[in-house]
Amino acid sequence: VTTCGLLRHRPGGGGAFWVDSQQKRYVPVKGDHVIGIVTAKAGDVFRLDVGGSEPASLSYLAFEGATKRNRPNVQVGDLIYGQFVVANKDMEPEMVCIDSSGKSSGMGIIGQDGFLFKVSLGLIRKLLAPKCEIIQELSQLYPFELVIGMNGRIWVKARTVQQTLIIVNILEACEYMTPEQRKQALAKLSGT
Amino acid sequence: FMQRGLDSQTKKQLEEEEKKIISEEHWYLDVPDLKEKESCIIEERSFLRCEDLVYGRMSFKGFNPEIEKLMIQMNSKCKEEEIEEDDKMEADVSDEEMARRYETLVGTIGKKFLRKRDQRVLKDDDEGEDDEVEEGNSNTRPSKRAKKTFIKPQD
């Protein structure tokens, strides 16, 4: 597999090299947290669309506190935040909503309302960097909730529909704006 | 006829012929075997390990308090920040109030078990317990003072 991009190096730990490339299409990788949309219920297993080549499967027992009697309340069209347990090119990817110790730690069904949209993977990595200015600046504006999936999907929820849409537009536009333009736009918003 | 026996015999003959052919034409390396070094390279497909990425679920300005707690937990696993502040916030009754209540509680219950004469002796029991987390306050029973002699009640 060949990709084009910048070669990055991290000296700490064992030292790591990776290629920082830009793409829109997501390839499922084990351990990644993603947002999936439930497309079908097939017996005990849900099919989720994660933006990869195949739908991922999610067992109903993979939620915190789920037993055979106590099933999670998942409907078709729900949004779910989970991580991959199996993800290679030969098999259909499998997801779970609990981590290795059995706790959900924020994963599971994402609540009602809110807005889901898709961005490129490069922007996701920028947003999830340890000290992201975009997110820090946005958090000063108004209270809101944000879920970022590594498959390029972001879910936003704020108090009013207008605020939600503003945040969505800023996040989408952030990819191509320079920091100064961004600060200008935010200053306009916080002024009005 | 003995067909089964024949088969095994023909097999053996064929094998021997093959071996002969191979040993003449078979090339082999006249080089000592290279020792296989353990490759120290681990291939990793996820970006999570390369860059220190933050947890994906976030909430700001108190929109979703559970997720804010989660954010602090998750991010403190990477960088060790003090989680102690959070523990104090979670208690329903703050530690200071607990200490105050306990202080007075000890006094009132202690009084119950004193004899009548000593009850008069008892004055303020506040010996200034510190307002730190120490919930196990030491039972400071007032040291038994000398019994006072009978005082005539004033008419």
Image: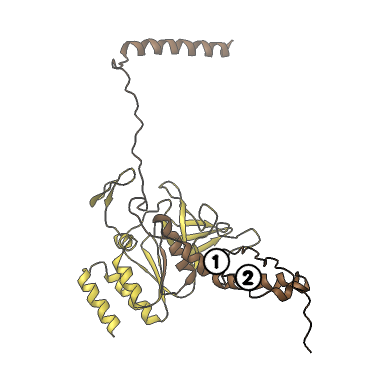
Chain colours: A yellow, B brown
In the visual, does B16 lie left or right of B112?
left
Q: Which residue does the image show at 66% across and 75% down from the upper left?
A: B123
In the visual, does B118 lie left or right of B85?
right
Of residues A109 and A99, the one nearer the viewer is A99
Of residues A44 and B96, the one nearer the viewer is B96
Three-letter amino acid code of the residue under disc 2: Tyr
Q: Chain of mark 2?
A: B
**Eyeballing the image, is B50 above or below A117?**
above
Three-letter amino acid code of the residue under disc 1: Val
**From this viewpoint, is residue A77 visible?**
no
Of residues B9 and B45, the one nearer the viewer is B45
**Eyeballing the image, is B33 above or below B85?**
above
For label 2, the SS is helix
Identify the residue position indicated by label 1 in the image: A74
* Residue A60 in picture, x, y percent from top left: 57, 59
Q: Which residue does the image show at 32% across and 65% down from the upper left?
A: A119
Of residues A129 and A114, the one nearer the viewer is A129
Q: Residues within 10 Å of mark 2 (few under 14, many from 20)?
A: some
- Checking the image for residue B102, the label placed there is 2
* Residue A186 in picture, x, y percent from top left: 27, 77
